[in-house]
Amino acid sequence: MKCAILDDQQGCRSEICESLRRYAKHRMPAETLQLDEYASGEAFLKTFRKERYDLLFLDQYMNELSGLATAQEIRRQDPVVPLVFVTTSRDHAVDSYGVRASGYLVKPYTQEAFERMLDNIGMEKIRRAQCLCLEQDKLLLREILWCDVNGHYCQIHTDGGRLFRYRMPFARLLDKLSAYSQFLICYKGCLVNMQRVEVMDTLDFVMDTGDRIPFSKRERRKIEEQYHAYLFDQARREVLL
């Protein structure tokens, strides 16, 4: 699980991180927790992209760009990532509804209050958000770039240049991913995650990592229609949120 903590005070960031680690240790011991800290909204927004994080914590009163202004920009890029405001006052609690904040945590807080807030926002549901389970691995769908075949093995290429190999028929992998509309067959034995496509080039999908995944020239028209239909559906969903 990936979480980002935005606060201009190091002590406050450390406190949230420690509270999260305690929660994870007792409530989800099998989960790998990645905690990224940012001292300002500006620093966070420089690297932020849609679906990068499972949960965000924002200090309401950061210097320069406030927590609310940061949240508004986050919502322009990602309409669904859960946001939790951490603040010393409830004076601006009403403002948080405008950016669909999932939770509100008032400092100082106890570990009990912290965990109750996480339970209230549906932490278990967030934790189990779309993932692919194969053998002993649990792969987050948003981290998958593309899948292909090498001999008797299915290969799954993910963030950070990581490669997962499984001895299984490609048809079985297709079946496991068939429920998720973001996956598109671009040629026989290759599946691309359209969530991670930056642009569709002449005969390639250019991923947000810079990787280029070719697709069938003969199937170009069909693939183009499927890709544009996916983009349209995503845009429609965001408008309805």
Image: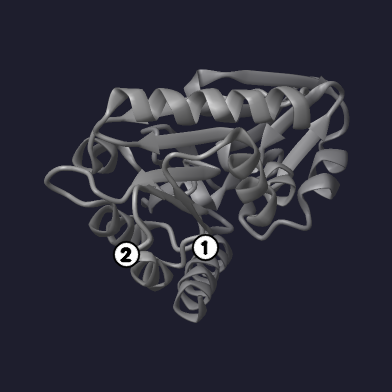
Residue ID at (69%, 49%): 119
| Left or right placement of residue 85 versus residue 41 in this view | right
Q: Nearer the viewer, residue 79 or 217?
A: 79
| Percent position of residue 134, x then y | 83, 29
Marker count (numbered): 2
Q: Residue type at mark 1: give it.
A: Tyr
| Left or right placement of residue 92 versus residue 159 in this view | left
Q: Which residue is mark 1?
A: 227
Name the outermost residue toward the left.
64
* Nearer the camera: disc 1 or disc 2: 2
Q: Residue type at mark 2: give it.
A: Asp
| Percent position of residue 53, x then y | 49, 41
Residue 185 position (above or below residue 236):
above
| Left or right placement of residue 160 versus residue 127 in this view | left
Residue ID at (11%, 46%): 64
Q: Nearer the viewer, residue 133 or 66?
A: 66
Q: Which residue is mark 2?
A: 91
Mark 1–mark 2 distance (CA, rounded to whole Å): 44 Å
| Percent position of residue 133, x then y | 81, 34
